[in-house]
Structure formats: C-alpha cells, structure tokens
C-alpha cells in the first residue's frame, strides 16, 4: 500500500490541475501524503536534524534515561500506557517560548504562525515491553513532519491495517491532516490514527 507522493515542482506548470487533483484525492482518501521538490532548502533541513540530535545528546539524553518510564522498564513493569519518547515544544504564537529553552539554538526559532514539536525516540533495552509512541489522532489542523532519513517507525492505520511510513529520503516532507481540517471540511478530508526515530513536526492550528 503506497503512500501518496506529490511532486510540488508540477504545481506551477501545465500539470498544476493534475497535481491539485492528486492532493485532493490524498486528503480525501488518506488524510496524509508525502511531498518532494518542495523548495525547502536541503541544507537547512539537514542542519535542523543535526542541531536537534546535538541538543538531545547534550541536554535531554541523560535526564530521559533517569526518568520514571526507564525506571519502570528496568523493573519490568507495565509501560503500555506510556510513550517511549523524549520531546519538547517550541511555540511561536501567541507567545514564543524559544528563549526559555535552555541551551537551544535560536536559529530554529524563526516563524510566527505555528508550533513545532521536536521528538526523539531513544534506544530501548527491552523492546518487548514498550510500544514506542501510542496510537493517537492529531488534534490540530495540519502537521508537516521531517522524519529520520535512516530509521522507519511512523505508522498509520488505513483500511484496517497499520501502514509503515518509510524514512524521509531526498528530504521529502510528510504531511497529515488533523481533526480540525476534518471538521472544517465537513468530513471530506480523512484523519487517520498514527503511532510512531527523530521527528520534527510543525503543527498548524486553525
């Protein structure tokens, strides 16, 4: 089952109508798709991933492995209701919090119309005891997701099956619509449950 792939370089040419039809179909039947040739600078995208990995190693890794979820795992306790995730949020509106995040590069704080969730999914010593990020629906408008380019992990529930989203090769951006868009479209667009590893998600609320 192939995830829809939209080539954005065709939006401004003779194939614009065809591309818009593909976007409409992806939103209506899937509620998610990948985009390529989106003109977001590749160097910038690689820099974002590099800075996030450095920030995790220097500021979050130690505290994560000292957290209650890790202690529970070491005791072989039930962790099925917990997310194996190290994450933080950058809010741009109504008030930015970028200056309040210790030791975080201000280069990633530009923007004034969305929030950004930054998540790492650390190595787990007991994979049989955790589910990673639990299945959920996204209570927002639109999510633009920059995934790890080596390791898969994100899955979507489609037609009764969990579908794995491949790593973001060639700096493709993964897009999924949340429940706000489904409501505003009167159910025309779909919203699928997902569960997730590096991911950087720009969350747009309407």
Image: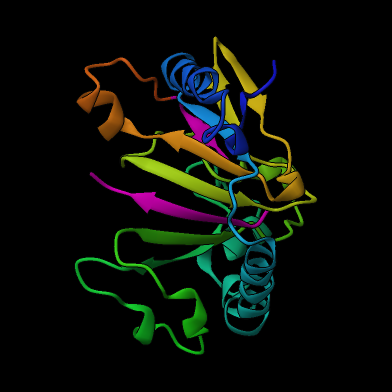
Quarter location, residue 133 = top right
Residue lying at the far front of the rendered structure = 14
Q: Position of residue 130 (x, y in %)?
A: 63, 45
Question: What residue appears at the point 58 percent right and 37 percent down from the top-left corner?
Answer: 8
17 and 37: which is toward the camera = 17
In the image, residue 112 above or below residue 51: above
What residue appears at the point 59 percent right and 32 percent down from the top-left corner? 10
Q: Quadrant of residue 172?
A: top right
Q: At which x and y percent is residue 55? A: 61, 79
Observer-nearest of 160 and 28: 28
Instruction: Say whether residue 175 is left or right of residue 122.
Output: left
Is residue 163 inside the magenta stretch? no
User: Is residue 199 depicted above or below 178 in this figure?
Assistant: below
Give the quarter of the image for residue 73.
bottom right
Residue at the bottom extreme, as displayed: 103
Q: In the image, which residues are magenta?
A: 192-206
Front-most of residues 114 and 80: 114
Q: Say which residue appears at 27% left-offset and 16% top-offset.
A: 187
Q: Measured from the top left, where is residue 168 in percent x and y? A: 70, 45
Query: Is residue 199 magenta-colored?
Result: yes
């Amino acid at each position: 089952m192939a995830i829809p792939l939209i080539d954005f370089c065709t939006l401004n040419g003779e194939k614009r109508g065809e591309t818009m039809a593909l976007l409409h179909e992806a939103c209506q039947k899937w509620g998610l798709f990948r985009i390529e040739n989106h003109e977001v600078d590749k160097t910038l995208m690689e820099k974002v991933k590099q800075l996030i990995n450095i920030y995790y190693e220097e500021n979050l890794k130690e505290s994560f492995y000292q957290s209650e979820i890790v202690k529970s795992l070491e005791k072989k306790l039930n962790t099925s209701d917990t997310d194996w995730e190290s994450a933080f949020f950058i809010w741009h509106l109504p008030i930015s919090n970028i200056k309040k995040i210790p030791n975080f590069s201000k280069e990633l704080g530009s923007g004034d119309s969305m929030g950004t969730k930054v998540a790492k999914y650390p190595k787990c010593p007991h994979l049989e005891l955790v589910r990673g990020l639990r299945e959920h629906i996204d209570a927002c408008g639109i999510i633009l997701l920059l995934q790890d380019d080596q390791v898969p992990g994100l899955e979507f529930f489609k037609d009764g099956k969990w579908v794995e989203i491949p790593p973001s090769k060639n700096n493709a951006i993964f897009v999924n619509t949340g429940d706000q868009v489904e409501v505003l479209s009167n159910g025309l667009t779909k919203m699928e449950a997902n569960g997730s590893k590096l991911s950087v998600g720009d969350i747009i609320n309407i």
